[in-house]
């Protein structure tokens, strides 16, 4: 009887496992295919791309598109890359510092305006950037920060900060205060207990939040287009726009080559922090 009842159960488990595996493969293919299409298109001539035939592999393999990217006359790739990298790293570093301190404040301390502060963060996240872009532009213009790295960094920090604070609040709230108190009983100061006990536990959360901030700042287009409009101060998303031609043939091959190069830093950054990011995402999903 035991063998008879167990056999259908095993069969159902195997069928379910096969179905889940097939579903995972489908999701993987759907997710990876746009990336594959972008990369393989970057090695095709522009005439082959705009033709009527669909090619899943370059028939005329060429590196000319990457040469075009690096030799672009209006806005070279390297300055745009350095602008994006500098602004993104500054944005992530500054946002994490301020967000971390704010998350500690609203989690570890009780004050009168604490609930109002948390609600304000939620409300600010609901406001689209397009609604305040005129105000941002006028403020930066009055401070002489248009077409500067500092000006766009300030805008990005203001954009990323609410989400970063809200996310880190969940991670900080998931670390019990008892751990710090136990460390203080053992002889550590409050600051020492925080750095030796609490901070290592929050590191995965900082990494996971930093990845989202990095991607958001790296891919942002509209604010960078308005604030840094000069060719020498363009970021990569705005720089890609220079290959669009309104009255002629758009060089889609060069756009795909530029998009491929633009994706490499994000992939490298993700690979460097993937272990801590995975643990941070799991921790954030079950805490706070």
Image (cartoon, rainbow, N blue to C red):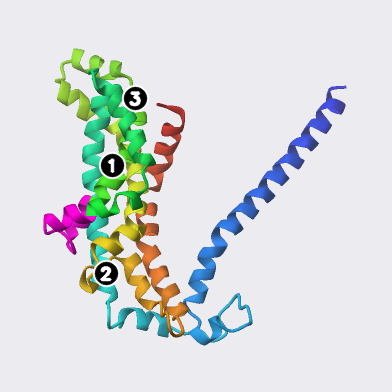
- How many neighbours does mark 1 have within 10 angstroms: few (below 14), some (14-19), or many (20 or more)? many
Between the C-alphas of marks 2 and 1, the distance is 24 Å
- Left or right, residue 241 beside residue 286: left
Q: Quadrant of residue 189?
A: top left
Where residue 268 sits in the image (x, y, percent)? 36, 58
- All told, the count of numbered labels is 3
Which residue: 63% across, 49% down? 24
Q: Secondary structure at mark 2?
A: helix
Between the C-alphas of marks 3 and 2, the distance is 39 Å
Quadrant where the N terminus is found in the figure: top right
Residues marked 3 and 2 touching at CB (< 8 Å): no
Q: Earlier in the sequence, mark 3 or mark 2?
A: 2
Using the image, tell me which numbered label, if any, was put on residue 23. Answer: none
Using the image, tell me which numbered label, if any, was put on residue 173. Answer: 3
Q: Secondary structure at mark 3?
A: helix
Between the C-alphas of marks 3 and 1, the distance is 18 Å
Q: Confirm whether the magenta stretch covers residue 153.
A: yes
In the image, residue 197 above or below residue 13 = above
- The secondary structure making up most of the magenta span is helix
Residue extent of the magenta highlight: 137-154
The answer to whether residue 44 is visible is: yes
Q: Quadrant of residue 116?
A: top left
The answer to whether residue 45 is visible is: no
Q: Earlier in the sequence, mark 2 or mark 1?
A: 2
Mark 2 lies on residue:
80
């Amino acid at each position: 009887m035991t063998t008879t009842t167990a056999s259908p159960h095993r069969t159902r488990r195997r069928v379910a496992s096969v179905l889940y595996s097939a579903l995972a493969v489908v999701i993987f293919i759907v997710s990876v295919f746009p990336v594959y299409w972008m990369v393989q298109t970057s090695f095709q001539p522009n005439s082959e791309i705009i033709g009527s035939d669909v090619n899943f592999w370059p028939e005329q393999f060429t590196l000319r598109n990457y040469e075009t990217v690096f030799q672009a006359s209006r806005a070279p790739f390297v300055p745009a890359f350095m602008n994006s990298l500098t602004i993104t790293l500054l944005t992530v570093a500054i946002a994490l510092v301020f967000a971390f301190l704010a998350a500690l404040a609203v989690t570890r301390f009780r004050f009168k305006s604490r609930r109002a502060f948390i609600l304000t963060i939620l409300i600010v996240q609901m406001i689209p950037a397009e609604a305040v872009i005129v105000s941002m532009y006028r403020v930066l213009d009055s401070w002489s920060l248009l077409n500067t790295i500092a000006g766009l960094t300030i805008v990005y920090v203001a954009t990323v900060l609410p989400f970063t604070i809200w996310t880190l609040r969940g991670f900080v709230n998931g670390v019990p205060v008892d751990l710090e108190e136990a460390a203080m009983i053992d002889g550590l100061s409050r600051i020492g207990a925080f750095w030796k006990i609490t901070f290592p536990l929050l590191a995965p959360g900082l990494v996971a939040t930093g990845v989202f901030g990095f991607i958001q700042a790296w891919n942002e287009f509209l604010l960078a287009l308005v604030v840094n409009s000069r060719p020498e101060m363009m970021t990569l998303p705005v720089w890609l726009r220079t290959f669009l031609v309104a009255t002629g043939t758009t060089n889609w091959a060069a756009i795909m080559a530029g998009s491929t190069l633009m994706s490499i830093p994000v992939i490298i950054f993700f690979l460097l922090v993937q272990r801590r990011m995975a643990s941070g995402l799991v921790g954030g999903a079950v805490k706070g």
